[in-house]
Image (cartoon, grey):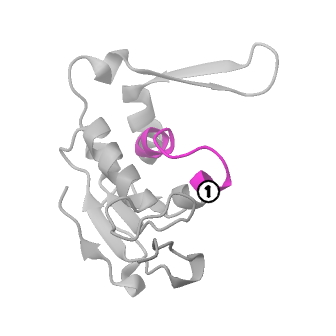
Amino acid sequence: MKTFTAKPETVKRDWYVVDASGKTLGRLATELARRLRGKHKAEYTPHVDTGDYIIVLNAEKVAVTGNKRSDKIYYHHTGHIGGIKQATFEEMIARRPERVIEIAVKGMLPKGPLGRAMYRKLKVYAGNEHNHAAQQPQVLDI
């Protein structure tokens, strides 16, 4: 019996919707990254994007444990000299709540073209509304 290798054109991708309200950020992000990679499927192949599309709702209601709400700091650099910027978890949730989940999941995906393709299948929304009803997403309980 030959070893099965998934082909990019034969991969079947499903759409799932996840409610992030009350979920712990890291535990949610690990499961999202696992499903974006396709590791939950029997036909998983490391060099092929076999993952599913995932829609995350209520990103503004994601939870963190301990004092991370005020202690966790996100850094980014503008590219200019002295251009390092920082924001706490609270500030990020107030400004752009979807970025918190996006950053957490992106760090758990492979680096390079394959990881970027996996990341593009993640759709995060701050509220309870999304514009992917035509894809008929299934509810995924994490």
Is residue 79 shown above or below 95?
above
109 in magenta: yes
- Left or right: 118 as drawn, with respect to 42: right
Rendered residue at 29%/54% (across/down): 58
* The C terminus sits in image quarter: bottom left
Q: Is residue 124 visible?
A: no
Callout 1: 10 Å neighbours few (<14), some, many (20+)?
A: some
Q: How many marks?
A: 1
Question: Which of these two is toward me, 39 or 104?
Answer: 39
x and y, in percent, of residue 141 in the image: 17, 61
x and y, in percent, of residue 72 in the image: 39, 20
Can you name the residue that lies furthest to the right here? 81
Rendered residue at 34%/67% (across/down): 41
Is residue 128 shown above or below 11?
above
x and y, in percent, of residue 2 in the image: 46, 75
> Is most of the magenta stretch helix, strand or loop?
helix
Is residue 118 shown above or below 131?
above
The residue singled out by tag 1 in the image is 114
Can you name the residue that lies furthest to the front here? 1
Question: Which of these two is toward me, 23 or 2?
Answer: 2
- Left or right: 112 as drawn, with respect to 97: right
Question: Which of these two is toward me, 72 or 104?
Answer: 104
Q: Kindly indicate the quadrant of the structure image that contains residue 79.
A: top right
Rendered residue at 21%/49% (across/down): 21
Secondary structure found at label 1: helix
- Left or right: 67 as drawn, with respect to 107: left
* The N terminus sits in image quarter: bottom left
Q: Which residues are magenta?
A: 101-116
Three-letter code for the amino acid on which mark 1 is drawn: Leu
Rendered residue at 30%/24% (across/down): 69
